Structure formats: structure tokens, C-alpha cells
Amino acid sequence: MLLTTRIAFRYLFSRKSSQAIHWITGISVFGIAVGTAALILVLSVFNGFEDLLSGMFGRFNPDVKLVASNAKFFDEDSLLMMRLRSLDGVEALSRSLEEVAMFQYGDAQEFGMIRGVDSSFSKAIDMGEATVEGSFATQSGKRALANLGSGLSGRLGVRVSDFGEPLRVFLPDASPGDGPSLQAYQDFPITVQSTYSFQQESDYNTAITDLDYLRERLNRNGVLSAIDLRVKKGYNPEGVARQVQTMAGPGYIAKDRYRQDEAFFKIMKLEKWLFYALFSLTLVLVSFTIVGALWMVVLEKRFDISVLKCLGMENRAAKSIFIWLSWYICLAGLTIGFGIALGFYALQKEYGLIGVPAEFIIDAYPIQLRLLDFFLVSVTVLLIGFLASAMPAQKVGEIQPVFREE
């Protein structure tokens, strides 16, 4: 093996090779380098967006969320609540109830969700940094208060500093009766206490108020939509979610932050691998230049190969020379491509060379390198190099040793 790798290395830098071979080899290295850099950077941009959006979602989503498996609501179980509070790794626990609502302020109307939370909500979800205007609170004495997402308040034209008409909330009427009511909803006024922003969908459709007040309005005493848990530092949320699932049983689903937005992250991963496949196809196209370079080397080195076979080299070893030659070309391209990617990464991080539209929450495209991506790209390029050497290596196997008789 050492002999074949040395011969392949000499063929790569042979001074006796024609200029055409050097040019085609150089083009191959350049193409592999550009393709490698593009693959690394595309994957890194997706990594950056994934980290950015995970952080944004994580601000409003609890570490672990417990919901009913086959229903919108479930009855509050005091024994389960006590066991969850005593679970090792749980720092705080909050109960919540959600329902579809219509909000009206003046002539403006918007549909969204109203969420009732208990007094422990701020311990499970950090609302301090997210509060934009006012101060977060769900009740003042016996009076319930509303906290609107910044997008929802903007659409309705609500300002916390305004002391005019209150926000009106329209909810489904769940009052018991003999039959369907002509008025299938109820409405009530509520004072807006604050606005918040997590830079995500909840900003545009969610109002937060007091749990007991919302239960009373919905006539759903003792009912919950979810239990939110905050995990202590040093504990793995996924592990805590598994413990919660075991404790709660099959009637519930315990979701970590990833599972709470699982569909979104699956779409992001699908897009990431689609782009990976697309850019890998460009490397496949570049590999045809490697095939051309190897064919020319085979034609030029026919006599050398014949002599090596006369000296006892087997076909398998002779073929491996050109497999290694292909890999050397790919390794040269990989090294240069990694260097380009690292250089661009540093410049993008420092100067934000490629920006995003002004209305977005960041100034430049986020980018994040991961070691796994380098490994994946390396395997991809070397596999393409191996496939590119298949036909030239097959041709080497057809070259026969030539013996001269004196």
C-alpha cells in the first residue's frame, strides 16, 4: 500500500506529464475546493439559523411541556402536580389554559389565543427581558390583566400608556344550557398591562391573563391545557422530559423544546439536506474533470504500468494507484476548500459581509461551523473521488505486462 500511495503521489506532481494533464488536474482541484467551500458554508448558514431560531423559541417555550395526548384539555391532577414538583431536576412548574379568542380595540379586530397562567408562570418562563412596554402581571387585586404580544398589540393599535377604552375579548360560550344558543360567544373587557416580544409567532396571536379568571369565563374549573416545567441548570431537558413522561403515563405527552416545534425543525432539516444534495451534485459534475485527468494519466503511464506488472505488481495494486491519485486530487481540493470556508466564516462573523433585509431581527446571515459537517463533506468528496476513479482504474486492469525477448 505504501508503494502505491508513493507512486500516486509522484504521478500527481510528475514533471514529465503534459501541460494538459496539469491544467485539467488544477481545474479539478479548483472545482473540488469551490464545491467543498460552498457545501460547508451552506450547511453552516442553516446551522446558524437553527441556533438562532432555537434560541428565540426557547425564550417563550418551557424546557418541558406536558399536554394531553388525545385531547385539547385535561383535568388537573393534584397528585401528579405534587409528584412533578418533587421530581429531581424540576426548578419551577406552571399551569396554563388556552382558548381561541377574538380581540377588539376600537374598530380593530384580530383573532388569536388567550392564555391563562398561574402565579408561577414567570418562574417557568422569563418574561423580564421580553417585556417591551409596561410590567408583566396577570392580576391586580381581584382584577385580571392582559399582556399582549407586540405584534398583536400593534395590529390592534393598543398602547399600555393609553387609559381609554379597555380591550374586549370574545370567547366561545361554554355555559351549560338546554340547547344551542343564538349567541354562541361571550365578551368581556380587560385592561392591558404590558406588551412582550419573543420574536416569534406568539408575538402576533397570544394574550396572557390570569388562569383562574379565564377558567371562570370559560366555565372550565379544574381544567388545564398544559403544564410548563423549568429544568434546573446542569440537568438535561430531554432526560427530564422522559422522566415526566414515565410519571404522567400514556394519557400525556411530555415535550422538550425541540418537540414543541418539531414540525418546524423537521422542515429546516429537510431544506438543509436538500441543499446538501443539490451542492453535492455540483461536485459530481466536477468529478468528470477528475475522470478526464485520470484517463490522460493512464494513457501517458501505460508503459510504466506494464513494467510494474512485469515486476510482479497485481492488478488490484495497479488500480489502487489511480484510486489514490483521485483521492489526492480530492484531498487537495478539500484542504483548499476548508481554508476558504474558514476564512469566509471569520469575515462573516467579524464584518457581516452578507446582510439580510432591514426588517429582519439580525443584520447579517448567521453562520455556525460544526465538526460533523466537515466530516460529512470529507466523506462525500472522497466517495465521489473513488467513483470517479472507477473507469480509469478498470482500464488499468486491462493493460497487459509486456516482456521483451533478446
Image (spheres, rainbow, N blue to C red):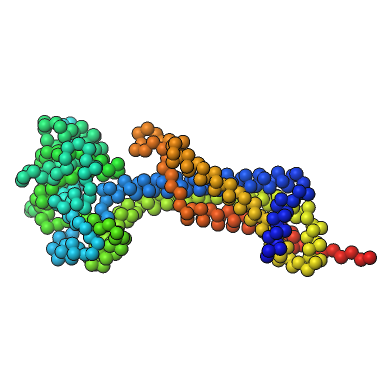
The picture places residue 233, in percent across and down from the top left corner, at 27, 57
The image quadrant that residue 63 belongs to is bottom left
- Left or right of 288 on screen, residue 401: right
The picture places residue 36, in percent across and down from the top left corner, at 55, 48
- Left or right of 37 on screen, residue 260: left
- Left or right of 111 on screen, residue 2: right
- Vertically, is 278 above or below 67? above
Rendered-image quadrant of the C terminus: bottom right
Residue lying at 54% horizontally and 44% vertically, measured from the top left = 340
The picture places residue 380, in percent across and down from the top left corner, at 56, 55
Camera-nearest residue between 215 and 353: 353
Rendered-image quadrant of the N terminus: bottom right
The picture places residue 153, in percent across and down from the top left corner, at 21, 36
Camera-nearest residue between 248 and 156: 248
Camera-nearest residue between 292 and 13: 13
Residue lying at 44% horizontally and 41% vertically, measured from the top left = 349
The image quadrant that residue 224 belongs to is bottom left
